[in-house]
Structures are given as structure tokens and as C-alpha cells.
Image (cartoon, grey):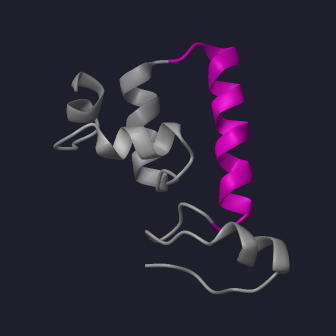
Amino acid sequence: MDLARALGKKSNASVSRWLTNKRVFSPREFSNFVNAVKPDEKELDVLAELYSEQIIKGRGVGGKRRLKGNVDAGTSESLA
């Protein structure tokens, strides 16, 4: 729960969804996560690379996430 509180969340549900890749951080959430976890330089590089891959796929931006099938099919349908 400490991580959830540090990220401004009321429960661990959001953190769990991030860790299981059911949801992707918004840019602000990613920044808050990095500030809370304080990774070393190598860990930060890994986290930034993984996060950027999700952003490139259109996930984690504007509170929307794309269905995996839609990303693979190249369509732009998204869920709110």
C-alpha cells in the first residue's frame, strides 16, 4: 500500500494492473513511479525502454489504452 499511496492512489489495484500489464502508466504516473521507486541508472534505462515501447503502441496516453488485437491489426479503436 505504501507504493500506491506514494503514487497518489487509494488502493493497490492500480499498481497491480500496472505490474500485470493490464494498464499502462500515464506519463505523469510513470514519473511519480520513478520518483517513488528511485531506480539506479541501469534500472531506469530498463524501465524507460519498457515504458516507451508501450507509449509507441499507443498505451498509457490520455488515459486510454488500446486493445492488443486492435494494435496488432493497426486500427485506432481504443477504450476509455
Return the x and y of residue 57 as percentages of the image width and height: 72, 64
Residue at left 45%, top 18%?
A: 38
Residue at left 28%, top 37%?
A: 12
In this view, the residue in front, 73 or 43, is 73
Taking the view exactly as shown, the residue that stands out farthest to the right is 73
Asked if the stretch drawn in magenta spans residue 43, the answer is: yes
Horizontal side of 12 relative to 17 (left or right) equals left
Return the x and y of residue 7 as percentages of the image width and height: 29, 38
Which quadrant: the N terminus? top left
State the predominant SS element of the stretch in magenta: helix
Asked if the stretch drawn in magenta spans residue 53, the answer is: yes
Return the x and y of residue 48 as percentages of the image width and height: 66, 37
Which quadrant: the C terminus? bottom left
| 63 shown above or below 80 | above
Q: Which residues are magenta?
A: 39-58
In this view, the residue in front, 23 or 58, is 23
| 33 shown above or below 78 | above
| 61 shown above or below 29 | below
Taking the view exactly as shown, the residue that stands out farthest to the top is 40
Residue at left 69%, top 86%?
A: 76
Return the x and y of residue 49 as percentages of the image width and height: 73, 38
Horizontal side of 45 relative to 26 (left or right) equals right
In this view, the residue in front, 38 or 21, is 21
The total of numbered circles placed on residues is 0
Q: Image quarter for residue 31? A: top left
| 21 shown above or below 75 | above
Q: Image quarter for residue 6? A: top left
